Amino acid sequence: MNAITRRDLLKVASTGCLLTLPGQATTSVLGAARRGVVRGHMTGAQALAETLQQEGVECVYGIPGAQENELWDTFKSRHINYLLVSHEFSAAAMADGYARVTGKPGVLCVVPGPGVTNSLSGMGEALLDSIPMVAIVGDVGNGAHEHAFQVHALDHATLLRPVTKQVISVQTAAEIPHRVREAFQLARAGEPGPVAVIVPYNLFIEAAHVNSGPLEAAASPWDDQEARRAYALLSDRRLRVGIYAGLGCMPYSPMVVHLAELLQAPVATSMAGKGVMPEDHPLAVGWGYGPQGTLTAELAFRQVDLVLAMGVKFGEVSTGFYSLPQHRCLIHVDINPNNLGRVMRTSVSVPADSGMFMSHILDDPDTFRRDPNGRLVESIRQHRCEEARVNGQPGRGMCVDPMAFLLALRRNTSCDVLAFVDVTLSQYWATEVFTATQPRSFFNPTNNQNMGWSIPAAIGAQRVCPGRQTVTITGDGCFLMSAMEIATAGRESLPVKFFVLDNRAYHYMQELQRPAYLRTTATMLANLDYRALAQGWNVAYQEILGHGDMDTRIRGVLSYDGPVLTRVHVDYGRRRVRWLKAARDRYTAGLTRDQRARFLARIGYRALDPMPEND
């Protein structure tokens, strides 16, 4: 057998397919796609179901309805794996979780009207976070015999356009396979994202002759002149390089490691890129490289002359409200040309797939190689140790310090655990200390910040990764947004471990409100009976009320072979959140003189009130 080159691996990775290695008997997804002609006389539902099979879809998430019952019945006849959800937002979040774990487009199937509108937030998350997804949307009937004023007769294409890369409207049963394949191609191509396919329900029962083969992979952008300029900078050994890797590098984790070692470069990641670089590697410095991320990353990048940013957009959340420092030289590489140079001033902007960009360097290593830098490695080690020492000091209080809980959870979970984190204040601590040693193992909703995302996303991932330990870390406010989906885990015996950080408040909002207004508004939550909820959903229950037996209780939860809801009674105390301080400082610096004066006047007036009204 001929040797497999780096470019061969890159080509396979770019298609989102698996490579069959020598000695393996399994059939690759790539091979299945080549055989994947959908041909014959069949109904629209049959044609759509067979196309999903040929695209390698492992699970469809959604809720059937009158307009799609024919399709769901066909799913069962064709043995397509599906998961009934409790709410269509969850269908989108589950498809999102599936896509983040597998690297393949997640699929949801929803009815028109409320099915579509309920799913929009989840699709918006996938769009802003660059997650491939295909939404099969049933529609009201079309044609001369259809009546006016049908139920759910909203303008679905107009609703879906803002939260998708493209909306594809199907007109005939015969075109269904081709149009669905177009959706999968678009979802994967360039910067990934969701694509919607709208199918009038009458087409599901209409029969037609179909003949649709697999589509060619879309071409990736490449600017040879800009790439050469970037390579010239990187080959200058006088420049100390730091790598900032995002989600666009996720398929190429081994290449990022090799590149870092070649350039002797510290590697920081964006929030979404966490895990691209194994965080136990000597050159890994954590996430961010400014005041919002890990202190190790901030200190390491102060010694950097040239930042190589790949597969990142420099979004507001990941940069701490745009608080990253501007370096002398910045090379920005991204597959979407529209993302280049939008936030940071760049020296060179290269529209390219991150893997293709790295492959040219790794194919000519002698041009770029730096001597081993023991001083850098030792400096990173020392900074990590000091950070670990500070983070490991438990907060004072009667309840659980969230940082101590996160460290204990990571101590007791497996190396390949799938960790889903929600939009809590603790998401930033989790990104700092929940060590990810593998790609596609740590997940959070970054750019749309959908509260409640982690519970359904984890369920969607667990459905197709039955052997992987799966945990969620959510707050009590996020819990209220999607808690009913735990009933799905109970019904299906999906062993997700749901950890809820409970302090009966929207603590994130309180931390934003108190410094600016000296009081809180609309942040207090109800005192829930979590044990009764777990019993009603048919899942096991545990409580963690203090530090004394925390590790023992966590191990007990993780060893249980079914879903578990765990309430962690937390007290945030006065532990510093680096992200929050960085974002607040950056926001304050951007205020005008008049705006700052009004804020200070209001604070001065309210400081005289000894009994602020908090709710």
Image (tube, grey):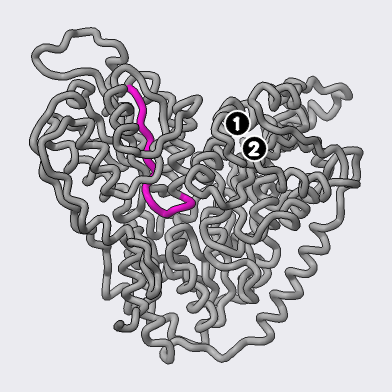
Q: Nearer the viewer, residue 507 or 392?
A: 392
**What residue sits 17% from the left and 43% below the top?**
178
**What residue sits 67% from the left and 61% below the top?**
294
* Relative to 333, residue 164 above or below: above
Q: Is residue 109 magenta?
A: yes
Q: Which residues are magenta?
A: 100-111
Element assignment for label 1: helix
**What residue sits 85% from the left and 23% below the top?**
609
Question: Alpha-carbon neighbours of circle 1 within 10 Å: few (<14), some, or many (≥20)?
Answer: many
Q: As shown in the figure, which amino acid type bears the numbered disc 1? A: Gly
The answer to whether any part of residue 240 appears in the image is no
Picture quadrant where residue 296 is located = bottom right
The answer to whether any part of residue 178 appears in the image is yes
**What residue sits 11% from the left and 18% below the top?**
143
Q: Which residue matches tag 1?
A: 490
Q: Which residue matches tag 2?
A: 563
Residue 161, numbered circle: none
Question: Alpha-carbon neighbours of circle 2 within 10 Å: few (<14), some, or many (≥20)?
Answer: many
Image quadrant where one finds the C terminus? top right
The Cα–Cα distance between marks 1 and 2, rounded to whole angstroms, is 6 Å
Picture quadrant where residue 374 is located = bottom right
